[in-house]
Amino acid sequence: MSGSTKQISAAQNAPVTSDTLSRSMSVWHSFTLGFAVVSPVAGLYAIIGVQTVVAGGGWFVALAVCLLMQLLVATVYAELSSQFPIAGGAYKWARQLGGAIAGQYAGVIYICSTIAMVTTTAYTGGFWLATFCGSPGTGGGLMVLWGALFLLLCTFLNLAPVSIFNLVIKLGVYAEVAGSFGVALLLFFFFRQHPVLELFQHMGTGTAPSEMAAFLAALAIAGWAFIGFDACSTTAEETHQPKRMVPRAIFMSLLVVGTVVLFNSAALILAFEHDTLRNSSHTADPVTPLIASSIGDWFEKPFLAIVMTAFLACGASMVKYTSRIVFSMAREGNMPAVLSQVTVSKTPRNAILFTVLLAGCGLIFGLNDDAVATIIAFGTGGLYAMFTFTTGFALFARLTGRWNPALGELKLGAWGLVINILAFIWSLFELINIAWPRPYAISADAPWWQLWATPLVLGCILTCTTLYILCKKWMPSKSTHF
């Protein structure tokens, strides 16, 4: 074993010298957190309309391919978490495997992309909250207000006793499984209108110019449905026996969510006419009218309650997930130390409030629909940039001897290297695929900055981070010189 590997393996058991978090989560709680962040309802219902318009049909295959490849990424995350179960997850791994500068880049990208996801979840969840309350907002201002109210509820849940938070997350999981999965079962067995072959037909009949363009666009859009499983790793310090339990939670959350998403999408595709899905996708809520028309108007309110509970659990989990990354960076000295402080109950309250404040500021962009689309695009692209960063550094550290995966609880042997290579290639491909400008996926008259939103925002973040690092190195030398 090389010296650097010894140093890294020793660091994982080093005592934490700053504030620590309470170990209050079992593997079930860790799984439910990851499940709520990925959220089959929030994931599928946010993309089904766009998929139908852009790809036309056949996008079920893209979902299946995306899930399979994301399982490779999850395996790398599971390997790392089985050896380095530290708050911050991928940020902390990048710091340990690549050094402090690599950690700074990873942390900034991670925080920015997850905060964009919190903003997106709050904006979307605000719509469902308004619809559930019987007063759906039609203007940008009303949508922002409902999104802010939704975000406020998520904040209260994160600051409440952990038993209340866990209860809401459990209700969210039950709503996802018993509600959305139950509805999908009803649609599949009693309201199916098409043969199973319908799942694999009509690719390229949407706005995409060709079948290949439709499939690539469908892959890019499907990426949104299978992100968030890494939330299990960011809360590793709050999980009992994290080296064993966190990898299990990562796999469980992605596999269960993937199964529900695939079955739900299949049920919706087979239960409704192709034109119906295409036309309904132009509304903000393409699913509820379709469900109500098949099962009955009486089911609309219970269905909205199910979706609302799922979104609330997703939003609260997203806030917790992001605040732990902020907490970890602050504890390492890369953010103000006040954000690493915890309460008597070991809750990082300042990190939670900081996360919510930034996500709330992002809601202001909801006044402009084009800006909201940009935030959604960056939230997805930013996380795939993080997947690329993490799998890339893991591969580099594995090949150079800086990381010995055999020291972790999850031992894959030679397969670990093969999976790591494939996971890196997939993450890089999907990042480029998501960032690729597609006027037919957004709007024919979309401005250039919206088409290039993901590379522009990522470029700005990397540039600002580089300037900060250079200034931080230059300023001490300048003061010493004088």
Image: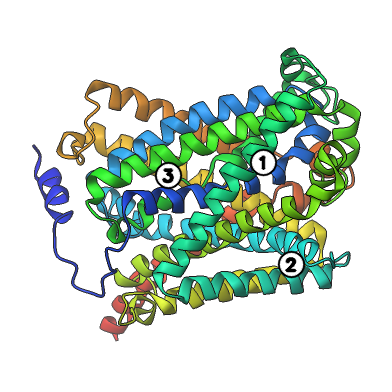
- State left or right for residue 139 relative to residue 333: right
Mark 3 vs mark 2, CA separation in Å: 28 Å
- x and y, in percent, of residue 85 in the image: 26, 52
- Give the secondary structure at mark 2: helix
> Which quarter of the figure is the N terminus placed in?
top left
The CA span between labels 2 and 1 is: 23 Å
Q: Residues within 10 Å of mark 3 (few under 14, many from 20)?
A: many
Q: Which mark is residue 250?
A: none
Q: Distance between the Cα atoms at labels 3 and 1? A: 26 Å
Q: Is residue 217 visible?
A: no
Residue 44: mark? 1
Q: Position of residue 198 (x, y in %)?
A: 77, 17
Question: Tag 2: residue type?
Answer: Phe
Residue 419, percent from left and from top? 36, 26
Q: Is residue 480 visible?
A: yes
- Circle 1 sits in a helix, a strand or a loop, which is it? helix
Nearer to us in this view, 378 or 245: 245
Observer-nearest residue: 104 or 317? 317
Q: Which residue is mark 2?
A: 365
Q: Of label 3 and label 1, which has the lower sequence position?
A: 1
